[in-house]
Image (tube, rainbow, N blue to C red):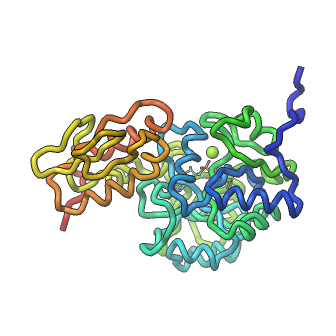
Amino acid sequence: MTQKNERIPDQRFVTPDAAGMSKAARELASGQLVAFPTETVYGLGADATNEQAVASIFEAKGRPKFNPLIVHVPDIVAARRYVDFNDNAERLADAFWPGALTMVLPRRTDSNLSLLVSAGLDSVAVRVPSHPIAKALLKEAGCPVAAPSANSSGHVSPTLAEHVQHSWPDSNSTGPGVIVDGGPCQIGLESTVVEVDSDGCTLLRPGGITSDDLEKIVGQLAIADGSSDAPRSPGMLARHYAPATPVILNASCPETAGAFLGFGPNMPDATLNLSVSGSLREAAANLFAMLRQLDIGKFQSIAISPIPEDGLGRAINDRLRRAATTDEETRPRHE
Ligand code: TXA
Ligand code: MG
């Protein structure tokens, strides 16, 4: 019988030597998933600028919702390419980066990050990890790396390479193609997530860095309510996911003067198609960008094909139901 944590032979494991790191970096660059150690927990990484690669993170984890992801970068210079810093962010970065602090900051409008990384929000969570293997991988890959904890949805976060294998035992599965084995994670608890504003900071998830330590730098933290793994304020999310144009779900054709967002083959009426081949991964990758493309005030409605309620389809439908909300308070309007 297999003992807990006993190593089952698996060609996905690589040691963090030059050959292993270059294999992992190549895997990331080609849009594949790589599990790698950070000082907090193992992450399931993808190139954060590659929409399909980011979609495959959600697919691999079996997440029913598109929770926004943390973007890992090698240093503050890289972080500045993707988010707008304020004074508090400068102070916190100075005090705790590299390390177990994730800062949620406004997404730069010229950022080339995947839209799925932010899950429709106007913010991005960024972190500079201190683990030497994570640092080396970020440097060698040369791209920002989106990474949630490397466990399937509902499981506890992994602190050993073997834990990653437990979530994806089958190397032909949707999980990582490479698992960089860096032994146990020092902190073993996820990073602290803080939304950082110039006039105050809000703790979104307690983690590796204590509130006391943070408060020494930025003063008292506000505490977000809700569960630690939920994005802040569902109301806020509903607003971000809802286009200003009314959305009609499970449609087979456009309304008069409306757009039609198709899914699957043989859709001659589709203004845009989430995936002609019917791939849920491709659809997830296209979802936010296509909703934005159609929500430009030119169409009176956006009718959307039914999406199968399995795999990534559950997360897509979760977002589509929010997009179709008729709650007038949270619906944005065209100016
Ligand atoms: O230690 C960690 O943070 C690990 C390692 C791999 O870095 N990552 C991790 O990621 O725990 P994940 O996806 O399991 O948790 C990310 C948390 C979630 O609670 C998510 O809602 C929040 O960060 N988050 C990410 N982006 C956000 C955003 N733009 N606004 C608000 N919350 C955000
Ligand atoms: Mg997690």
Residue 287: x percent and y percent? 39, 50
Residue at horizontal 53 percent and vertical 67 percent from the top: 196
Residue 223: x percent and y percent? 52, 55
Q: Is residue 120 visible?
A: yes
Q: How many marks?
A: 0
Residue at horizontal 39 percent and vertical 39 percent from the top: 318
* Nearer-the-camera pick, 273 or 182: 273
Quadrant assignment for ligand 2 = top right
Which residue extends farthest left?
A: 256
* Nearer-the-camera pick, 110 or 18: 18
Residue 150: x percent and y percent? 68, 45
Up-down relation of residue 110 to residue 245 (above or below): below
Instruction: Tell me which corner region of the image, top left, top right, bottom left or bottom right, holds residue 97.
Output: bottom right
Residue at horizontal 37 percent and vertical 35 percent from the top: 307
Residue at horizontal 66 percent and vertical 62 percent from the top: 101
Q: Quadrant of the N terminus?
A: top right
Instruction: Tell me which corner region of the image, top left, top right, bottom left or bottom right, holds residue 278.
Output: top left
Q: Is residue 325 visible?
A: no
Up-down relation of residue 109 to residue 66 (above or below): below
Which residue extends farthest top?
A: 1
Q: Quadrant of the C terminus?
A: bottom left
Residue 123: x percent and y percent? 47, 63
